[in-house]
Amino acid sequence: MKEKLQKSVSLLMFLNVVGLGFGQSTVWKIDPSHSTLGFSIDHLVISETVGEFKDYSVTVKADEKDFSDAKISVMIQSNSIDTEDEKRDEHLRSPEFFDVDKYPQIVFKSDGFRKSSNGDYKLSGTIQMHGVTKKIVLNAKFGGIVKDPWGGTRAGLKIWGVLDRYDFGLKYNSVMEAGGLSIGREVRVDCRVELVKE
């Protein structure tokens, strides 16, 4: 009896290890025409400037219907920043900000997508930006999975949170006449992502 029990435990441990090795098999790709990787930042204390990145790739691997096992990878081309002002965008691409020639990409890889008590999620992972790598946690909402009119399967995510740009060495600023800083330190992330099942 004892020998049978030991064999059963060993078999279960083996199956668990094998299962962990395979990971998720369902791949989802972003539909850029129905997605936005956006942000906003305070300007002159009294208002906000908004922008987005236009060139990026997002891959999600998730088998569970609620995406609770999701692994998310994002690669953004930093020179694709767009605030609808070319002069400002050129400044943002310069060494005073993103220094896109030296740091051409922003990369995020998740290590957790966990549902909280209110039904929303916490997306955790590592972001590499401007030569700095940091762990971050963002808020997320899973919109569900639907069949589209063209026979495909789609899923939706909303992701938001706050990053401190100083943490990534993006410290350029200027002082106003009244003494305050013209550009905010906090960057509010606001992403809406529509995914297509491959």
Image (spheres, rainbow, N blue to C red):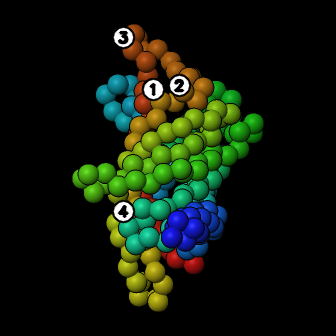
> Looking at the image, is mark 1 or mark 4 earlier in the sequence?
4
Query: First in sequence: mark 2 or mark 4?
Result: 4
Query: SS for tag 3?
Result: loop
Q: Secondary structure at mark 1?
A: strand
Residue 36 position (above or below residue 105): below
Distance CA(mark 4)–CA(mark 3): 43 Å
Mark drawn on residue 166: 2
Observer-nearest residue: 195 or 136?
Answer: 136
Please say if 69 is above or below 51: below
Real-space CA distance between mark 2 and mark 1, rounded to the nearest whole angstrom: 7 Å
For image coordinates 43% across by 30% down, the residue present is 186
Q: Which residue is at a point 51% across and 30% down the rendered structure image?
A: 165
Q: Which residue is mark 4?
A: 142
What residue type is disc 2 on? Answer: Tyr
**How many angstroms separate mark 2 from mark 3 (CA)?**
22 Å
What residue is drawn where x is 59% and y is 56%? 73
> Is 90 or 185 nearer to us in this picture?
185
In the image: residue 67, left or right of residue 3: left
Q: State the SS at label 2.
A: helix
Q: Is residue 140 above or below residue 48?
A: below
The answer to whether residue 42 is above or below residue 151 is above
Residue 178 at what x, y percent from top left? 36, 11
Mark 4 surroundings: few (<14), some (14-19) or many (≥20) residues within 10 A: some
Q: Earlier in the sequence, mark 3 or mark 1?
A: 3
Q: Looking at the image, do the residues carrying marks 3 and 1 touch, with CB atoms under 8 Å apart?
A: no
**Which residue is farthest front?**
1
SS label for mark 4: strand
